[in-house]
Image (cartoon, rainbow, N blue to C red):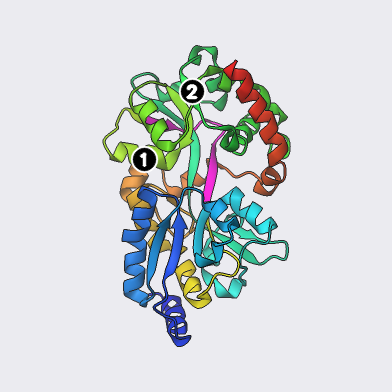
Amino acid sequence: MKKWVWAFAVLAMGVGVARADIIHATWGGGGAAVLRDHFQAPFTQRTGIAARMAEVPNTAGLVRSPTAAQYNVVEVTYFEAIGLAKSSLLETFDDREIPGIANLPRELVVRNAQGRIVGLSTHFAYYAIAFNTTLAKASDFQSWNDLADPRWKGKLAVTRPIYATSYDLTIMAHANGGSASNVEPGIPPLRAIFGNALTTYTSLAHMNTLLARGEVTAVPFYSTRVWNLRREGQMTIDMVIPREGALMLPYVVVVPRGSANRAQTLAYLNALIDAEAQTRMSAQNGSIPSNNMAVLPPEVERSLGMTRADLMQRMYIPDWNVVVSNYEDRLNQVEQIAAGARR
């Protein structure tokens, strides 16, 4: 067992509330089950600190709610973590309390304006192009701009503007010479992609069905969803990273302000960013470990066709602070694009 795990466990027991539950809130579904079975169970066995999952539909909304302090750890997207930090809704930590951050890329640690830690990336997925292999091939999508080709009219799906603003617009800007600060180059191709879309998917399950049934040919989608679909036997679904790269989507754990059981929570956070734990969970859900010392499980590496180091070379990591700061104005633009495509 890692020495710091024992140290924090002993500290937790010393404050007289060692059996208090650590409540970890995340989205419902397979991700929660993986955490429960492959992280929390061994964590509790090693440390004696009880932990359980809470499945909720909107994790960032939970942190903003009056009851947020009843949760110890909440999983959110990276850009949501930045927004929450700006609103002073999160507990903060000193680097010495979380020694494992030495093995995290600097850009995957969320800090507040004072430089204190407010969020830690436990893993990441990436946003690339998923397609049905009976209707298209990887070479059809060598560039993000290929999605704007008129031949895909009525054959694509797109996500809702609340997500397309942060994800699709950002990667399309990058693919056309722009950046997180300058998204104007991404507007025309994004408009063309919405124009090619048959539908806007309303949930991940909805999108899974559209792809599996061949109702749409391709969609900008999440790597972990494709990995899990293929693991479940949907071998007609695959994913390609265009030459401009994939959008890295880090997932971050935060602690709501006022949350109790700080010592146990610190033990839990340090365990979440441990390389061994991240590798173990990667084998179950296809997520990519954020810890630089972690290695991809063989089955994940085979499915990707590359090592973690090779994959990192193909990731585009935008300045999420800029994305968050400009979100409302850009959302209005994307909503207008979506509305125009529906006419």
Could you tell me which secondary element the residue under label 2 belongs to? strand
Q: Position of residue 53 (x, y in %)?
A: 40, 60
Tally of marks: 2
Residue 184 visible here:
yes
- Give the magenta range: 238-251
Residue ID at (60%, 66%): 257
Q: Quadrant of the C terminus?
A: top right
Q: Position of residue 148 (x, y in %)?
A: 56, 19
Position of 230 relative to 82 (above/below): above
Farthest front residue in view: 66
Position of 94 relative to 83 (above/below): below
Q: Position of residue 98 (x, y in %)?
A: 54, 71
Residue ID at (69%, 56%): 86
The three-letter amino acid code for the residue at tag 2 is Thr
Q: Is residue 119 left or right of residue 304?
A: right
Residue at which label 1 appears: 227
Farthest top residue in view: 151
Which sits earlier in the primary sequence, circle 1 or circle 2? 2
Front tag of 1 and 2? 2
Residue at which label 2 appears: 199
The image quarter in which residue 20 lies = bottom left
Residue 305 visible here:
no
Could you tell me which secondary element the residue under label 1 belongs to? helix
The three-letter amino acid code for the residue at tag 1 is Trp
Q: Is residue 40 magenta?
A: no
